Image (spheres, coloured by chain):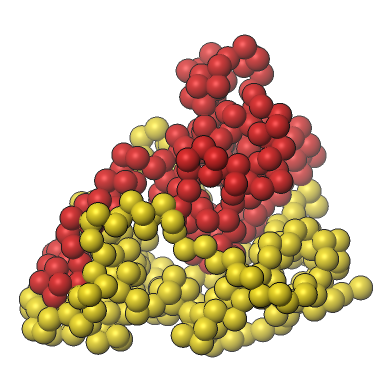
Chain colours: A yellow, B red
Amino acid sequence: MEGPQDLGGKMGFGPISPEPETEEPLFHAAWEPRVLGVTLCCGALGYWSLDGMRHARESLPPATYLSASYYQIWAYALENMLIANGELSEEELRLGRMRAPGRAQSKKLPAAKVPTVLRTGGPTLRETGAEPGFAVGDRVRTRNMHPDGHTRLPSYARDKTGTITARHGCHVLPDSNAHGRGEQPEWLYTVNFDGRTLWGDDGDPNVTVSIDAWESYLDHAE
Amino acid sequence: MTARVRALETILVEKGLVDPAAVDAIVETYESRVGPQNGARVVAKAWVDPDYRAWLEEDATAAINSLDISGRQAEHMNAVFNTPETHNVVVCTLCSCYPWAVLGLPPVWYKSPPYRSRVVMKPREVLAEFGLVLPAETTIRVWDSTSEQRYLVVPMRPAGADHMSEDELAALVTRNSMIGTGLPKTPGAV
């Protein structure tokens, strides 16, 4: 989806102005760590995948997304996902109080399980037995695609020719997993493009950009 | 935002969906246990141990896991090595993918539109804004983390650090040097 999240190559956001590394706090407001923790806890309820939550964030209105801080984006998307899955109502949010008990209480993440959950994460590698369609060194062209739903092929890297530089095995396909259509794992590749291919004469000849692309994003090229 | 988030957490706790102690445990993990010190151990080991460096190149996930570093947002790791000719830098243009278990939670600039939009198109300019001015002949490789593959930049060992121990070397490794927007500290600067 070409939502506000698809930022590669967009202009007008100004300079970086990074805070010095030694001075930057981990959180910039007391509510930020709560959003982080509550979001991870709600992930355990089983209503959505990481891909689904990413889609919820990129589905925020562009004006909202671009004017919100990182953890605001998380909070808004979490509210929307809880509402969409029937675990929260607009009225409850307005009142700041529960009107009906939760339905997925049995899946609540207990504090004791947090270390294990964080250490395990959510590996996406899957054994499928599928033969890879491409080899390292192959020239490929990314597809010119504009899906309504979630995809991890950034718009700046569509319809461009590059070279496969790594193969990562078969991984969960976000394009289907984000929408509850199953994992549908596919071969995943690193594709390397040179700067001039992506940006024309405005590109730096001594720059390359790599993306990781699933097999269905790619066609063979000369 | 404070009231809105407090209300959300209160409702979810009342509903029996969120354990506030679990929220505390998650926050505590990233505030005090997981951070760039993990990645610094990996880099320092790669500097002193050629076998480890080769393992990191071949299977970064296993090599990193061997140091008891694993988990969320670092399930599938790749190490990319700076050389005199090539500098690596990492971004996620689509969200803010970052190897949490190895580097901790990302800094604000990493998650912000200015960095995500520009570093794929004008990396040399962006790096200069971090104070890292690279010669025009240095090749810059930008890694856009578009899947669950996560990238760790292994910077070059600084000059004058030949006789330092692994722990001393780890203290030279900055977070930004492992993203690619900086270089390690020089021995005299510690």
Q: Is residue A76 above or below residue B112?
A: below
- Between A59 and B65, the residue placed more toward the observer is B65
Tell me: A170 left or right of B164. Answer: right
Residue lying at the far right of the rendered structure: A222
Tell me: A136 left or right of B190. Answer: right
Q: Could you say which quadrant of the image residue A57 lies in?
A: bottom left
Tell me: A197 left or right of A91. Answer: right
Q: Is residue B80 above or below residue A63?
A: above
Expressed as whole percent of the image width and height from the top left, the position of residue B24 reads: 21, 52
Tell me: A221 left or right of B112. Answer: right
Q: Is residue A112 above or below residue B12?
A: above
Q: Could you say which quadrant of the image residue B127 lies in?
A: top right
Which residue does the image show at 48% across and 79% down from the upper left?
A: A178
Which residue does the image show at 39% across and 42% down from the upper left?
A: B34
Q: Is residue A191 above or below residue A33?
A: below
Expressed as whole percent of the image width and height from the top left, the position of residue B17 reads: 20, 72
Quarter of the image for the C terminus of chain A: give it. Answer: bottom right
- Between B16 and A160, the residue placed more toward the observer is B16
Quarter of the image for the N terminus of chain A: give it. Answer: bottom right
